[in-house]
Image: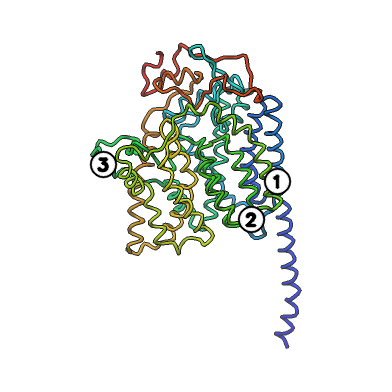
Amino acid sequence: MTTLRAKDETAPARQEAAAREEAAARNNARTPLMRNLLLLRLCILVFLLSNAALALGFGVVGAAPILAGCALAAFLLFSFRPKEGGLLAAPIDARTFAACLALAVALLLLGGETHLFYANLDWLVRDAVLSDLTRQGFPLFYRYEGQDYLLRAPLGMYLLPAAIGRWTGLAGAHIAMLAQNTLLLGVCLYFVARLAGARVAPFLALFVLFSGLDILPQLFLEGLALPDHLEWWNPAFQYSSHVTQLFWVPNHALPGWWAALLLLLLAREEIDLALLAILFAATLLWSPLAAVGAAPLIGFCALRLGRGLFAPRILAAAVAGLCFLPIALYLTIDAESVRHGWLLAIPGFVGLYVAFIAVEIPHAAILLAARERLARSDRALVGAGVVVLLALPFYSFGPNNDLAMRASIPALFLLAFAFARVAVSTPRDGGALASLISAIVIVSAATPAMEIKRALVVPAFAISDCDLLTSWRKTDPHVFPSNYLARREMVPAWLGAASDARLEIERRSCWPDHPHLPDSRK
């Protein structure tokens, strides 16, 4: 009797506790500031706002659909409701988020942002673009040898920092770019760490240091006289390590990583295809090549929806995406001047291809052997990513085959996520699988280690405010920057991009303290 009475007395207490928990859950659901969904919305909004910033430089005909598309996309973004009990509905893990932001700041600073550390060669032209946009705004025109050119390039990363820089100066623009990219990278790392469900520190280490086995062919070709950039052992194509992407091309890496992240969230049923569609449209302005690499993966996921592909939100997202058509047309102005073509006919292609795949993505073989360790929801998507990586080397686009280097970013992200997750969860028992994973991790670490070493050892140099033409002539005058400039007569009138200002080559020093360009006054 005593026991029954005690149970009866505790029942109301349990009911009251359950009611309190339910009320707390409802309150949390009403408070987006406490949920991971807020972080997702903030980052997608950054991509949308950069498109709106570019649209303000077009005429009404060009700007109106872009701004309408941004507005519709924002509505779809903020009307989305996450599933109960999912990652996006969960409270922000402040400790993990802070650690990921700190890691993001460290990686971006080491990569050359703000020039606190040595900035790689690509930053010389990238600094010039940011400087020109900060001083002049968009649209930007240049005059070279009597010909006028429009700045036609994926400007997404620069536009919001340049807008801030108009008020705060060039230094403020660089700090704003660091803040913008820290948010995008830090949130991305936070989400992959949470999605992995593994120990955060080792998982993030393996994910960030993901790379091919580039040092092996370099040792074969060069012996111990290794270059400080290991990835150009193959003259036809390159798959860049994650650290290389962040140090050399964050403007391509960040949108490519975010596309892959949303693909994972879609596979886990955390988001709908509408959010992925609007991100895809918004990231074209950041990196059309990364978007090209994401497109077949998005199409693969869309086809798996069946009739669900015609849901109202997805149809609305398709309409929003079509509104970004002026951005796509802007990016393709005079694009036929960019070098492109099939690679099958080059001498020794088959041997190069086989060696390239074996060196760059041996991780795929590990995942095939350990496929049971992959999350069931991820298997088809990761497999599709591997197919994309196998297909990309057959075609070249860009001065240095930028298609292979940049379109591979989303698929490499998926491969890195799956490999790091399997590696962390595999016991170090001396078995064949554990030994192969350890060998790949150790050998592949050489590539990011060399990138980090350069950042720490080579002296930093000051930020330059030289314009794009001047920076190009001082760094790579033999190849005209057709990926940045389009002839003015090729610009369609309806775009409405017009300006009387013309930037020309300047006769002055740009980097007097650069460690590798001592004669920068030429």
Neighbor class of circle 2 (other Cα within 10 Å; few <14, some 14-19, many 20+) is some
> Is residue 334 found left or right of 219 in the rendered image?
right
Residue 438's label in the rendered image is: none
Residue hosting label 3: 219
Mark closer to the chain start, 1 or 2: 2
Residue 316's label in the rendered image is: 1
Q: CA distance from mark 3 to mark 1?
A: 53 Å
The amino acid type of the residue labelled 2 equals: Ala
Relative depth, front residue between 420 and 94:
420
Q: CA distance from mark 1 to mark 2?
A: 27 Å
Relative height, residue 377 to residue 131 (above, below): below
**Residue furthest front as drawn:** 345
* Pointers 2 and 3 in contact (C-beta within 8 Å): no
Relative height, residue 201 to residue 158 (above, below): below
Q: Nearer the viewer, mark 1 or mark 2?
A: 1
Neighbor class of circle 1 (other Cα within 10 Å; few <14, some 14-19, many 20+) is some
Residue 90's label in the rendered image is: 2
Q: Secondary structure at mark 2?
A: loop
Relative depth, front residue between 185 and 302:
302
**Residue furthest bottom as drawn:** 1
Residue 174 x %, y %: 54, 28
Task: Inspect this view and state whether residue 348 appears.
Answer: yes
